[in-house]
């Protein structure tokens, strides 16, 4: 309706109107995009927080592993590497849920995601679904923070 009542006497007026209307459309899209990003960020945060806490509290039972996977997992536990991974997951989960330093922790969490996928690909392929969900969520969140990384990549 507004378009019908406007009359453009100059080409510049029409150009300005088109630019402003495009700006309104892109702002609407970015608001929707930010809500999707917020949901993905909180999902990733909850995902890693739950699995990080599980490494200490053992409230989710672990399934059967092959002998090689069990030996590797035992080595991670004995060397306290799994404790470090759990702490990183807990901190990353809290940070992502509350959106403080999320870009940094999403980047750090990427190493955990890739290693989880590699572990399950090579040693425990039957239980790879959770690791793939973690990787996909992490990539989506990294993409959502892409503007934060522009200074690093330019």
Image (cartoon, rainbow, N blue to C red):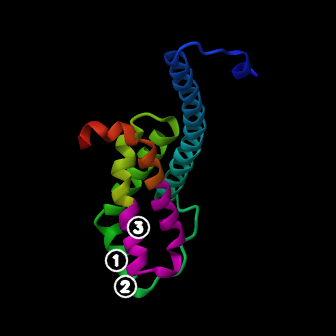
Task: Give percent across and percent down for residue 51.
Answer: 50, 58
Q: Quadrant of residue 9?
A: top right
* Residue 116 - label: 3
Specify which label sits upstream in the sequence, 3 or 1. Answer: 1
Q: Which residue is mark 1?
A: 72
Q: CA distance from mark 3 to mark 1?
A: 12 Å
How many other residues sit within 10 Å of disc 1, few (<14), some (14-19) or many (≥20)? some
Q: Which residue is mark 2?
A: 68
How many other residues sit within 10 Å of disc 3, few (<14), some (14-19) or many (≥20)? some
Secondary structure under the numbered disc 3 in the rendered image: helix
Q: Over which residues does the magenta segment extend?
A: 113-138
Q: Quadrant of the C terminus?
A: top left
Q: Residue 106, relative to residue 10: is it above or below?
A: below
Specify which label sits upstream in the sequence, 3 or 2. Answer: 2
Check residue 141 for magenta coloring.
no
Nearer to me, 48 or 18? 18
């Amino acid at each position: 309706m507004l378009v019908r009542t406007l009359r453009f006497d100059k080409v510049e007026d029409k150009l300005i109107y088109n630019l402003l209307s495009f700006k309104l459309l892109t702002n609407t899209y970015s608001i929707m995009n930010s809500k999707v990003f917020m949901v993905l960020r909180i999902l990733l945060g909850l995902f890693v927080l739950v699995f990080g806490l599980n490494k200490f509290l053992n409230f989710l039972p672990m399934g059967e592993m092959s002998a090689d996977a069990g030996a590797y997992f035992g080595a991670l536990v004995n060397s306290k590497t799994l404790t470090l991974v759990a702490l990183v997951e807990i901190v990353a989960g809290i940070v992502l849920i509350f959106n403080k330093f999320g870009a940094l922790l999403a980047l750090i969490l990427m190493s955990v995601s890739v290693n989880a996928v590699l572990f399950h690909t090579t040693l425990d392929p039957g239980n790879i679904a959770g690791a793939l969900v973690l990787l996909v969520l992490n990539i989506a969140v990294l993409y959502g923070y892409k503007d934060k990384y522009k200074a690093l990549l330019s």
